[in-house]
Amino acid sequence: MNKYLLSAAVLLVLGTSAAFAHITFETQEAAVGSTYKAVLRVPHGCEGKATIAVRVQIPEGVIAVKPMPKPGWTLQTKKGKYDKSYQLYGQAVADGVKEVDWSGGSLPDEFYDEFVFRATLTADLPVGQKLYFPVVQESHGAPPRCIKIPAPAQDEAAL
C-alpha cells in the first residue's frame, strides 16, 4: 500500500523560551494521491495558559486545502503559488492555501480540542517519507517563534 508518513512539527510558544508541544495528527499515515482529513489534536495549553491561536503551514505537494470552521474561533487562510503546477480532477492547479490560522478563541489549559482541515496529497509525493506540517500553538503573553524542521538525516529529538 502506498503510504506517506505525516508529522506535525509543532512549536509551543512559552514566555521567553520555546519547546515542542504535543500537537499531533489523529491519523499519521495517508496514501499518496489521496484526500486526507487532518485532525490536529491539541491536548493542553502552555504552562497553565489558554491557547488562543493555532497556525499550520501547508507543505508543498499538499493541495486543495479546506479547513473546518470552529465556533468561537476566527478562521483565516493564506494563499500563494505552489512551486509547480499539480493536477486535480483533470485540471492544472498552480496556487492554493499555504497556511491555515484559527485565532480569537480560547482553549483553557485543562481542556482538549481538535482543529481540522482536509487536503489532497499529490501523487508525486515520495512514498514512505515524512511530510512536515509546521504548527504554532500560541498562548496569552507569549511572542511567536520560528519552527525548526529536521534536515533529511537529522533526528527530530535533536531540535
Image: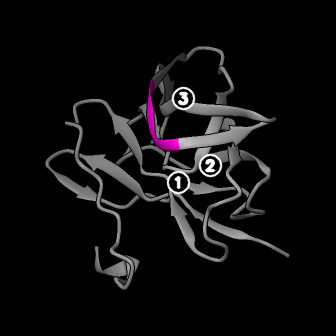
User: Would you say 88 lies left or right of 79 here?
Assistant: right
* Quadrant of the rendering where the C terminus is positioned: bottom left
Residue 82 magenta: yes
Q: Indicate the quadrant where residue 137 lies.
A: top left
Residue 157 magenta: no
Which stretch appears magenta? 79-84
| Residue 94: mark | none
For label 1, the residue is 23
Mark 1 touching mark 3, by CB under 8 A?
no
Q: Nearer the viewer, mark 3 or mark 2?
A: 3
For label 3, the residue is 96
* Residue type beneath disc 2: Arg
* Closest to the observer, 44 or 22: 22
Q: Residues within 10 Å of mark 1 (few under 14, many from 20)?
A: many
Q: Earlier in the sequence, mark 2 or mark 1?
A: 1
* Quadrant of the rendering where the N terminus is positioned: bottom right
For label 2, the residue is 41
Residue ID at (64%, 56%): 25
For the image shown, how many numbered marks are present on the structure?
A: 3
Marks 3/2: CA distance?
Answer: 24 Å
The answer to whether 31 is drawn above or below residue 146 in the figure is below
Marks 1/3: CA distance?
Answer: 24 Å
Mark 2 touching mark 1, by CB under 8 A?
yes
Examine the residues drawn in magenta and state their main secondary structure.
Answer: strand
